[in-house]
Image (cartoon, rainbow, N blue to C red):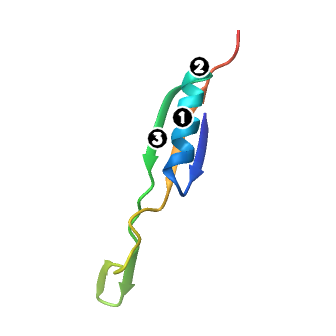
Amino acid sequence: PFVIFSEYLEPLVQCFREVQKRQVACKLQLSNTWTREYQVLPGRTHPTMGMSACGGFILTGIKVAAR
């Protein structure tokens, strides 16, 4: 298995297409890594205000061995 992280989608899309074209991996998946931070105070917990919309993107897959 492999995982590639990028803050930007475009480089991973290019990589995804190249890996598909060369047929060197299977089960390719491109995902958004959006996460929500929480502020924890005594007696109350809530999502942090003013968060960014995206934490980045990951490309995952399984490398296929050459015959």
- Where does residue 54 sit, x and y in percent of width and height? 42, 62
Q: What residue does disc 2 label? A: 23
In terms of secondary structure, where does tag 2 sit?
loop
Rendering quarter of residue 2: top right
Q: What residue does disc 3 label? A: 30
- Where does residue 5 sit, x and y in percent of width and height? 58, 50
Q: What residue does disc 1 label? A: 16
- Give amino acid for label 1: Phe
- Label 3 and label 1: CA atoms lie apart by 8 Å
Question: Are the residues at dot 2 and dot 3 in contact (C-beta closer than 8 Å)?
Answer: no
- State the residue in front, 2 or 16: 16
The quadrant in which the C terminus is found is: top right
In terms of secondary structure, where does tag 3 sit?
strand
- Give amino acid for label 2: Gln
Rendering quarter of residue 22: top right
Q: Nearer the viewer, mark 3 or mark 1?
A: 1
Answer with mark 3 or mark 1, whichever residue precedes in sequence: 1
- Where does residue 11 sit, x and y in percent of width and height? 57, 46
- Give amino acid for label 3: Leu
In terms of secondary structure, where does tag 1 sit?
helix
Rendering quarter of residue 44: bottom left
